[in-house]
Amino acid sequence: MDGYTIEEVAARTALSKHTLRYYEREGLLPPIGKAPSGHRRYTEDDIGWIRFLQLLRATGMPIREVKEFVTLTWAGDHTIRQRVAVLTSYRAALVERMARDADHLEALNRKIGYYEDVLAAQDATPEDITAPRVIAERAHRD
C-alpha cells in the first residue's frame, strides 16, 4: 500500500507521532489504512483532515468540541447548518482576539517608543535635550 508513514506525516504536519496516534484513538481521524506490515499509511486526504483539525485547535476549540464537530461532519450534509454555526462562533471569537491583540501590539509599540526616547535622551548632549523635537514629544506624552 502506498501512502505516508506516521513519521512522514508528523514531519509534514509538525505534530508528534504520539499526537497523531491520540487523534486516531479519540476518533478524530477516519480509519487510517495499513500496509501489509501493519504500519499506518496516511493518504493526502488524511493529511488534509489533520490540517483541518490543527486549524480547529488553533482557533482555541477544545478536543471535546473538535470531537463533536467531527461527529457532525461524519453524520452527513444534514448537519452543515450546525457546522456553520460552530465555525461562525469560533470565527467571531478569533476576530475579537485579533482586535485585542492589535490593541496590545499598539500599546507595546508606544511603550517601546517611550523607552527608546528615554534612552536616547540619556545618551543625548545638552543641546539635543532642548531640541524642539524632544520637547514636543515629551509634551505629547505628558
Image: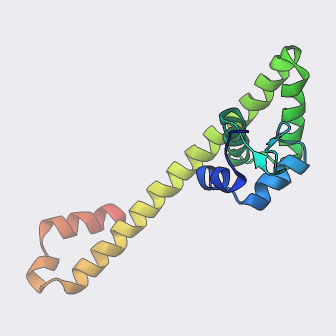
* x and y, in percent, of residue 94 in the image: 65, 41
* x and y, in percent, of residue 93 in the image: 69, 40
Q: Is residue 127 left or right of residue 65?
A: left
Q: Residue at x 69, y 45 (%)?
A: 54
Q: Is residue 81 left or right of residue 4?
A: right
Q: Residue at x 71, y 60 (%)?
A: 16
Q: Is residue 128 left or right of residue 58?
A: left
Q: Residue furthest top?
A: 78
Q: Within the image, what quadrant is residue 51 found in?
A: top right
Of 64 and 102, the residue lying toward us? 64
Q: Residue at x 22, y 63 (%)?
A: 136
* x and y, in percent, of residue 13 in the image: 63, 50
Of 133 and 33, the residue lying toward us? 33
* x and y, in percent, of residue 29 in the image: 82, 40
Of 68 and 105, the residue lying toward us? 68
Q: Is residue 77 left or right of residue 123?
A: right
Is residue 35 depicted above or below 89 in this figure?
Answer: below
Of 27 and 104, the residue lying toward us? 27
Which quadrant is home to the N terminus?
top right
Name the image colouring: rainbow
Q: Residue furthest left?
A: 127
Q: Residue at x 16, y 78 (%)?
A: 129
Is residue 38 depicted above or below 75 in this figure?
Answer: below
Which quadrant is home to the C terminus?
bottom left
Q: Within the image, what quadrant is residue 52 found in?
A: top right
Image mark count: 0
